[in-house]
Image (tube, helix red, strand yellow):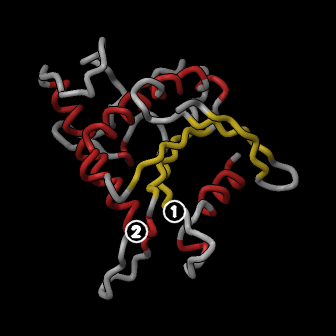
């Protein structure tokens, strides 16, 4: 497991460098080395397993939120894009008109907001949240500030660190009959082409 980097062509006139920093405990904090020159931070969440891994995912996201809010005021922090990956594994009910990407995004967003609120509440109450066992993890780490009223829960829409964009993605095999717009990485590539 290692950090990977590649050039990606978005259009004839736009190319970007993509750096993949795995979420493994040994590597995950190395994302900070790339932040000064980063325009977009993509945080990939497996939407199909978020329920089981929510505390660990929220802990890692908290580190990223803290890093983004630690930028000096004179420097524009990167945009945060949270990818609800494996959206194709969600089933749309007949009573719902929502596509699978919307279902995955709503699930990931709700679970992460709940877990980040637990972390925020435990910090403000002086109780240390259970972490992944990393040495020297700071119990007073910021990054979860919202412009909310006293006592309201953490919401990405109110996060003081900037805008957070949620996209649903999936990897649809070529043998699948699913339409690319329902999943795949097309939404991510289109977003990057429009916002870079």
Task: Return the x and y of residue 168 as percentages of the image width and height.
Answer: 48, 61
Quadrant location of the C terminus?
top right
User: Residue at 35% of width from left, 53% of height from top?
Assistant: 109
Task: Return the x and y of residue 106 as percentages of the image width and height.
Answer: 35, 61
Query: Can you tell which quarter of the image residue 99 is in?
Result: bottom left
Find disc 2 in the rendering and name its residue. Answer: 89
Query: Can you tell which quarter of the image residue 180 is in?
Result: bottom right
Q: Foreground: 21 or 190?
A: 21
Find disc 1 in the rendering and name its residue. Answer: 170
**Tag 1 or tag 2, which sits nearer the N-term?**
2
86 versus 132 height, above or below: below
119 versus 141 height, above or below: below
139 versus 188 height, above or below: above
Query: Can you tell which quarter of the image residue 92 is in?
Result: bottom left
Residue most extreme to the bottom? 94
Task: Return the x and y of residue 78 as percentages of the image width and height.
Answer: 58, 34
| Mark 2 residue crowding within 10 angstroms, few (<14) / some (14–19) / many (20+) | some
Number of marks in the rendered image: 2
Q: Foreground: 125 or 62?
A: 62
Task: Return the x and y of residue 20 as percentages of the image width and height.
Answer: 58, 37
| Structural distance between the alpha carbons of marks 2 and 1 | 8 Å
Q: Foreground: 156 or 56?
A: 56
Identify the secondary structure beneath mark 1: loop
Q: Are marks 2 and 1 in contact (CB under 8 Å)?
A: yes
Is 170 left or right of 16, judged from the image as shown? left
User: Residue at 30% of width from left, 11% of height from top?
Assistant: 136
User: Residue at 36% of width from left, 76% of height from top?
Assistant: 91
57 versus 107 height, above or below: above
Identify the secondary structure beneath mark 2: helix
| Mark 1 residue crowding within 10 angstroms, few (<14) / some (14–19) / many (20+) | many
Residue most extreme to the top? 136
User: Residue at 12% of width from left, 22% of height from top?
Assistant: 127
């Amino acid at each position: 497991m290692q950090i990977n980097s590649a050039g990606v062509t978005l259009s004839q006139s736009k190319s970007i460098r993509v750096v993949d920093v795995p979420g493994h405990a040994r590597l995950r904090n190395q994302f900070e080395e790339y932040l000064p020159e980063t325009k977009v931070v993509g945080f990939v969440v497996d939407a199909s397993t978020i329920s089981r891994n929510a505390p660990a995912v929220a802990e890692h996201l908290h580190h990223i939120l803290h890093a983004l809010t630690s930028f000096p005021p004179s420097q524009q922090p990167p945009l945060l894009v949270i990818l609800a990956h494996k959206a194709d594994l969600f089933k749309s009910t007949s009573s719902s008109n929502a596509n699978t990407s919307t279902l995955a995004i709503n699930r990931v967003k709700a679970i992460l907001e709940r877990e980040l609120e637990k972390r925020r509440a435990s910090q403000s109450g002086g109780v240390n949240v259970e972490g992944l066992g990393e040495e020297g993890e700071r119990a007073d780490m910021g990054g979860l500030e919202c412009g909310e009223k006293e006592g309201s829960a953490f919401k990405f829409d109110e996060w003081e660190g900037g805008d957070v964009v949620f996209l649903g993605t999936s990897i649809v095999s070529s043998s699948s009959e699913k339409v690319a717009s329902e999943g795949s990485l097309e939404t991510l590539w289109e977003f990057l082409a429009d916002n870079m």
